[in-house]
Amino acid sequence: MKNTIAERIADFLKKFPPFNLLEKDDLKAISENVKVHYLDKGRHCFTENDERHDQFYFVKDGAVGLYKNDGDEESLVDICDEGDIFGLRPLITQENYQMSALANEESVLYGIPIQNFTAIAENEKKISNYLIASFASNTRNPVELEKGGKLFTEYKVERNPDLFELQTATYISNPICCSPETPVKDAALKMRNQKIGSIIVVNDQQVPLGVITNSDIRNKIATGDFSINTQASFIMSSPVITQPSGITIAQAQMIMVRHNIRHICITEDGTANTKLIGMLSEHDIMLSKANNPSVLIKGIKRAKSIKTLREIRLKIGVLLKAYIDQNIPLSHVLKIVSELNSLILDRAIELSVAEMPTSPPVKFAWIALGSQGRKEQLLPTDQDNALVFQNVADSNYEETKSYFLELAGIITKHLHTIGFEYCKADMMGSNPKWCNSLSIWKEQFSNWIAKPSQETILLSSIFFDFDLVYGDAQLVDELSKSIFKSLEKGDLFYSLMGRDALKSPSPLGFFRQFLVEHDGKNKDTFDIKSRAMMPLIDAARLLTLSQHVKNINNTALRFENLAVLEPQNAELYKSCAYAFKALLKFRTKQGILNNDSGRYIQLGKLSKEDRLKLKRCFKPIKDIQELLKVRFQLTHFL
């Protein structure tokens, strides 16, 4: 007799990813085990810190909000509606729920049992990739991009097998073993001496019979349930899960989730009846995926040399390529890459300080400027940085400054070695102009604001986007307070900054053709940075400074914050934020394709669809510049 309910579920699921990637019989098998949940409005599916369920959820009807606890109240993170999945990540990471799921309206959910799903998915490349991408991006649907579909058609970016693909997992050959008769005490001593967390129990033919882990000893021996002299066979976890040597990372992850295990035995033919040749653990998978952000972070913190940091910086580039290739949302990519870059800078400065003959004489702060200060640096570009040190007596000033100039020289040299090119305009902390005490910096910014000129406006466009990288945060806070105090009387400064923000008009000509470079080595190319991105960057900076918005330098976040402050212009600001992220992603893709900064675009190589989508990003530029003209009365400057 047909299961009509299961058939209806299957018919509905097959319209949406990742279920549309399943074979008909596999989808039917999953549908037969789906649980249907009805949630009244205001009812929770789960709450933050709840233990994970044995299923993830698919929204059939209605809408479910995902909320994160923020102090005394919950803030809305996302809304899942028809076709969306949620609650998957905790099942992959084996952790409690990190958010709450609350029905925003009467909803019908399908509960998809994780074991049934992974049992089918673990051998399907597309499904495995989907789950891993979902895990990596922390999104409910990695097919989506910023809730707006794909911004540009997908390019054939070369995939790196180390990331998100089904590369062969690296396992430990010749693992530590013991016999079934070995006393647990002896097995534990072996584990301690070898500094490992598990041991394989094998018979005389070296066939794996079971696994003993630290948790087995803790839960069975330390509790008194078994004696320390008990034979290994009595406390081992058995039977073992076995696989052949060609197992991939994706398959291993799915198997571990399905069976709730952390170790897989590798045998000659992949069955439990042949000789053990290796063991694969969760830890090994993390190491195999050496470009996993958490692994990279650990590598950065442990780095003992600049050479190691350079190698990690190259891996970040590989990670970026993989994220872009997998269509991971740009906001997520920016957070990860920016954090990794900041950690590399932080560690490079620590190593540089250690090279100095003496410790710093006073507190100091190393600040990033420009795109790095805005946390918009995805592709490696040149350095823009500065150094501010604590005020000292006049008699000690030159000696103190000489110390920090020497330190800054080491830092910029090391950053160059890591992959951050020297700034052609020498806007670096190693330049005496940009290595000063707090009082000098305050005075400098105050003069720029009080007596603006074309030169100081240019400097402001770089130095006003600063972010602490290393050192004393209080110095940077005091500098920020001083800047905003000076801005209280900065009407002329705002006007000149506004004029500067209008220097790049709409990137399209009268007949809606792209305005390209007319001469030089980049002739006939489109400069996406100066013609499309900078107008948005400049406008966001000017508007947030005039609103005295502190501690937000990122262009997209600036516009999103302005949308909250000015509801009447919210639609415009949101469109500017979206356009900027689209342009940044497009530039990043171009840079990856052409192995350069992605700044100059060869329009002839773009598809018609991409040219049209690129043009659509230009409309907010014209609109935001019209707003600037009115707000800062700039018509008399034009």
Image (cartoon, helix red, strand yellow):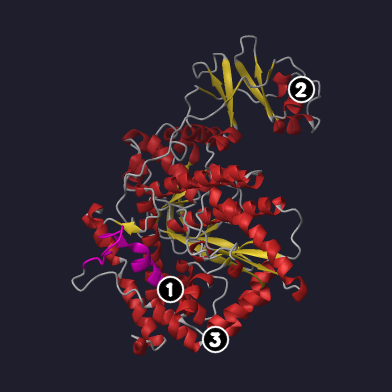
Question: Is residue 43 located in the magenta-colored stretch of the structure?
Answer: no
Q: Is residue 515 visible?
A: yes
User: Distance between the Cα atoms at labels 2 and 3?
Assistant: 77 Å
Identified at 75% across, 16% down, the residue is 182
Amino acid residing under circle 3: Ala
Q: Which range is magenta?
A: 513-536
Residue under pointer 1: 538
User: Distance between the Cα atoms at labels 1 and 3?
Assistant: 19 Å
Q: Is residue 604 above or below residue 621?
A: above
Give the crowd class for mark 2: few <14, some 14-19, many >=20 residues within 10 Å: many
**Split into 4 quadrants, where in the image is the C terminus?**
bottom left
Identified at 33% across, 77% down, the residue is 623
Confirm or deny contact between disc 1 and disc 3 (CB under 8 A): no
* Nearest to N terminus: mark 2 or mark 3: 2
Confirm or deny contact between disc 2 and disc 3 (CB under 8 A): no
User: Distance between the Cα atoms at labels 2 and 1?
Assistant: 68 Å
Q: Position of residue 566 (x, y in %)?
A: 45, 80
* Nearest to N terminus: mark 2 or mark 1: 2
Tag 2, which secondary structure? helix
Residue under pointer 2: 184
Q: Position of residue 494 (x, y in %)?
A: 47, 84
Question: Is residue 519 located in the magenta-colored stretch of the structure?
Answer: yes
Q: Position of residue 203 (x, y in %)?
A: 64, 12
Q: Position of residue 197 (x, y in %)?
A: 69, 31
| Position of residue 229 in the picture relative to residue 448 (left or right) | right
Amino acid residing under circle 2: Val
- In the picture as drawn, the residue positioned furthest to the left comes out as 511
As drawn, the label of residue 450 is 3
Residue 581 or residue 440, whichever sits in front: 440
Q: Is residue 604 above or below residue 389?
A: above
